[in-house]
């Protein structure tokens, strides 16, 4: 199967002579949009029909020069997902696993998310959401808060404890 060359700026496909050139162009364009893991790029190259040997050569070179850095991607993603989106440590690890990041890299990336910061983030999320639900009955508030925390990857025990604390504070 021959690699599908990426289009040029005017929409016409480029016909480079070797698949490594095609792989390089595809990877550079993909990395321009956002940082990607090596596995994500390998999947993209496979979908575009780039031969495995050419893909491996290009990906190895990109890792060597620092254009692909799964460790940096994982650390940045973990900080952003936990800090801005409020995801739990397990949810961050799951998202990174879906992106093809190795387990040992994931373990290092989520090491900075300890149980204290998880609890603080869960409390912050629950308090902000509870403030928008003042008109609802307490059972509906509890269901919605537990559901919110569960969707963000928090354990049932933490979700219920945080919900009880937030709703108890609201009643006081």
Image: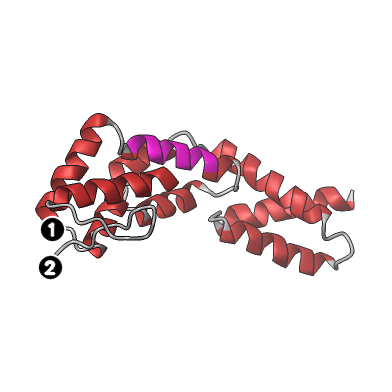
How crowded is the residue under tag 2: few (<14 C-alpha within 10 Å), some, or many (20+)? Answer: few
**17 to the left or right of 86:** left
Question: In the figure, 20 relative to 5: above or below?
Answer: above
In the foreground, 4 or 163: 4
Mark identifier at residue 19: none
Check contact, mark 2 vs mark 1: CB within 8 A.
Answer: yes
Residue 2, image x and y in percent? 14, 64
Q: Is residue 34 visible?
A: no
Residue highlighted by disc 1: 51
Image check: 172 left or right of 30?
right
Residue drawn where x is 78% and y is 69% of the image: 140
Q: Is residue 138 above or below residue 120?
A: below
Between 69 and 171, the one lying in front of the other is 69
Q: Is residue 70 visible?
A: yes
Mark 2 highlights which residue?
1
Q: CA distance from mark 2 to mark 1?
A: 8 Å
The quarter holding residue 11 reads bottom left
Name the residue nearer the viewer: 132 or 30: 30
Q: Quadrant of the N terminus?
A: bottom left
Quick one: SS at disc 1? loop
Q: Magenta segment, which residues?
A: 71-80
Asked if residue 144 is among those painted magenta in the image, a careful observer would answer no
Report which quarter residue 148 is drawn in. Answer: bottom right
**Main SS, magenta residues:** helix
Mark closest to the chain's N terminus, 2 or 1:
2
72 in magenta? yes
Location of residue 68 in the rendering, given as x and y in whole percent from the top left corner: 30, 39
């Amino acid at each position: 199967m021959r690699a599908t060359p990426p289009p040029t700026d005017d929409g016409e496909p480029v016909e480079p002579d070797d698949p490594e050139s095609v792989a390089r162009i595809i990877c550079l364009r993909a990395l321009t949009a956002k940082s990607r893991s090596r596995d994500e790029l390998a999947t993209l190259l496979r979908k575009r029909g780039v031969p495995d040997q050419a893909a491996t050569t290009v990906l190895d070179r990109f890792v060597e020069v620092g254009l692909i850095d799964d460790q940096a991607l994982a650390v940045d993603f973990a900080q952003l997902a936990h800090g801005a989106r409020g995801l739990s440590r397990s949810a961050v690890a799951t998202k990174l696993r879906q992106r093809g990041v190795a387990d040992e890299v994931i373990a290092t990336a989520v090491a900075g998310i300890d149980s204290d910061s998880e609890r603080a983030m869960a409390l912050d999320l629950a308090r902000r959401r509870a403030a928008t639900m003042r008109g609802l009955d307490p059972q509906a508030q509890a269901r919605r808060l537990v559901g919110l925390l569960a969707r963000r990857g928090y354990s049932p025990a933490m979700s219920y404890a945080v919900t009880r604390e937030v709703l108890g504070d609201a009643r006081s």
